[in-house]
Every structure is written in structure tokens, then in C-alpha cells.
Image (cartoon, rainbow, N blue to C red):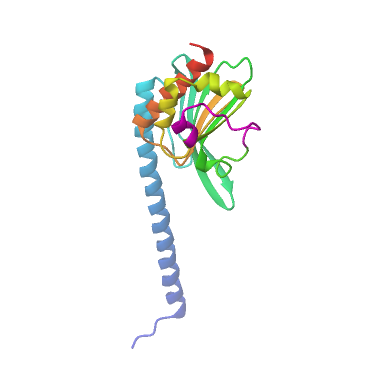
Amino acid sequence: MSYIPAWLILLLLCLCFVGFVVAVIGGILFFLYRSVQGVNRSWGDLGTRSGLTLKPAGVFAQPELSGVFRRRPMRLYTENSVGQGNRTTWTVLGLTVKNPANSTLEITPSGSVGNLFGKMIKAQDVVLGNPEFDKRFVIKSDPPDFAVRLLANSPVQTKIMEIPGTFRIHMEGSSLKYSKTNLEENADFLEKLFNTLSDLADRLEGN
């Protein structure tokens, strides 16, 4: 029986370990590459439809769409937050609006209030008079009648109710934003969302 030196065994073990680490890192990078290509295709298609410019995602860079949509500056991007040791990615759509009265607005599904979105506007829950809408959402605004004037008897209510899942619509100053957890890649849904928030902005500005 031939003798195998200890140093050779140690070398082989090290090489196996290095090979395993390289394979794992390669697999992760390949997965990230595939994900990046997917979001670039989806958001690129959306940019073509909407006239916005894509800043492509990379392995270490987040995607961004920006430009002017329906006469307003618009930006679609992602944010990351860390809480309780967990890292969360958010998809955020932001519009610039005219809000001379500096009114504030927040719309969130009732089951998410206080859990996912942190600080709420310091205002009482507003009732619009649509039982289905009022049951599903918590609406807060300052002044309180602002939400009623903006949303009551408006088709925008129906469009907001068609948005699935847990999300937040928030307006403060000249910023109107939609945000949700995870990276949203569905171009058809995002295009519809562009128009829903633009309709809300039109309503706000009296267009």
C-alpha cells in the first residue's frame, strides 16, 4: 500500500474546498446575472412604452427608469431597508406634483397599517363613503377633508382597488409615491400603475 504524504492530503482538501467555494460563488453570480437580465428586459420594454430612460441594473447596481410621463417628472427605482436583521427590497414609483396647499395623503391596505410602513401621518382615519374601499384601506390626510375631496366619487378609487397586494401610496410636499416590497418586474402592471398615479395627480391638480 503506497504512502500518501500528509501535506498532499491537506493540499487536496484545500483544493476541494476552494473548488466548492468557487462553484458556489459562480452559481450565485449566474443567478444574479439572470435576474439582472430579466429586470432589464422588463423595465427596458416599459421604458420604450412610456418614454422613460432606463439606467440598467447590474450585479451590484439597481435598475432605474426616469423621465417625463404625462407631463410630470417620474422615477421608478428600488430601495433597500434593513430591520431586525432582514434586508428588504422595495419597488418605488415617484411622481412630482403641484401641491401648493402642502396637503398630505396616505393610503394603505388595512392589514398592513403600522406593520410594514413605519410612521403614519398624524391624522385620523378618513371615511370616503364607499364601504368596499373604506373596509379595505386606511386613508389618512391633512387636512382630513382633503382625501374626501380628492377621492370621493372618483374613478381613481376603482383603479386603486385594482392594485393587488400590500402597498403604500403617500403624498407629501411635491412628492407622490407608491411603494411595495420586493422587485416588481411586470411591465404591464407597472404601466397600469403609472397611469393610476398620474390620474390621481391629475385629480389633485384639477386637470
Which is the main secondary structure of the residues drawn in magenta? loop
Could you say which quadrant of the image residue 11 lies in?
bottom left
61 displayed left or right of 143: left
Compared with 191, 165 (above or below) is below
User: Outermost residue, right direction?
Assistant: 122
The structure residue drawn at horizontal position 64% and vertical position 19%, both measured from the top left corner, is 102
Q: How many numbered marks have been drawn onto this rendered protein structure?
A: 0
173 displayed left or right of 91: right
The structure residue drawn at horizontal position 49% and vertical position 26%, both measured from the top left corner, is 75
Instruction: Confirm whether residue 130 shows in the render.
Output: yes
Task: Locate the N terminus by quadrant.
Answer: bottom left
Could you say which quadrant of the image residue 154 lies in?
top left
Q: Residue 121: within the magenta?
A: yes
187 displayed left or right of 82: left
Q: Nearer the viewer, residue 67 or 7?
A: 67
Q: Position of residue 168 (x, y in %)?
A: 51, 34
Q: Nearer the viewer, residue 186 or 32?
A: 186
Compared with 14, 108 (above or below) is above
Q: Position of residue 49 (x, y in %)?
A: 35, 22
Q: Residue 124: within the magenta?
A: yes
The structure residue drawn at horizontal position 39% and vertical position 85%, both measured from the top left corner, is 3
Instruction: Confirm whether residue 53 shows in the render.
Output: no
Q: Nearer the viewer, residue 14 or 191?
A: 191
Q: Position of residue 74 (x, y in %)?
A: 48, 22
The structure residue drawn at horizontal position 62% and vertical position 36%, both measured from the top left corner, is 120
Magenta part of the protein: which range? Answer: 120-135
